[in-house]
Amino acid sequence: MRRRALGKKMEQQTYFQTSSEDKIIGKHVFGNLYDLDEELLTDKDLLEKIVLEAVNIAKMNLVEIKAWKFGGKKGGVSVIALVEESHIALHTWNEYKYATLDVYTCGEQSDPQSAFNYIVAQLKPRRYQMFYADRSSA
């Protein structure tokens, strides 16, 4: 079957899954952390260390980790760990004592829940929300 998209020729391809093992296993754990220690939320080196340890705990394979500190209103720290299986992203807003945490993996052996739990335990929020999404291909 052929379709047209913006004047360009586009072919539709069909793929067949050959077995139940032939799929992407997508596990996404994410959430919001409230009432955190403001000083902790600006400690870029410590937050990077916490995320790095979470990568190991979750049995993920690190490609690269980066951290940035932002000043001013709504400032904080962002830490992104790119892993072979996907990523861990932590964003903090010290003025609001708030952080968001995103742990996504498409690795069958990795455990994003353990990474999320470790980071929450280290940051010690007074309360937090956690969500899970199955992002598998089938």
Image: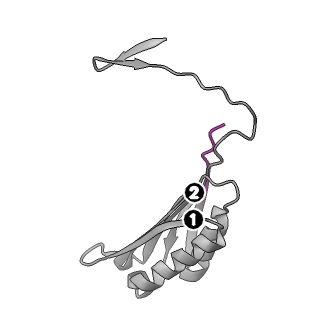
Q: Is residue 132 magenta?
A: yes
Q: State the residue position of label 1.
A: 129
Looking at this rendering, what residue extends furthest in the bottom direction? 39
Q: Residues within 10 Å of mark 1 (few under 14, many from 20)?
A: few
> Could you tell whether 107 is left or right of 96 in the image?
right
Per the image, label 2 sits on a secondary structure element best described as: loop
Q: Quadrant of residue 126?
A: bottom right
The color scheme shown is one colour
94 relative to 134, above or below: below
At a point 39% along the width and 19% down the height, the residue shown is 10
* Three-letter amino acid code at the position of disc 1: Gln
Image coords of residue 64 (percent x, y):
46, 68
Q: Residue furthest top?
A: 1
Residue 91 seen in this snapshot: no
Is 102 rendered above or below residue 9? below
> Where's residue 109, x and y in %?
70, 59
Residue 38 rendering spot, x and y as whole percentages: 41, 84
Kindly identify the residue that appears in the image at 37 percent across and 79 percent down.
94
Q: For the magenta stretch, what is the residue range?
A: 131-138
Which residue is labeled 2 in the image?
85
Mark 1 residue element: strand
Three-letter code, disc 2: Glu
Indicate left or right for 71 with 100 as reference.
Answer: left
Does residue 136 appear in this view? yes
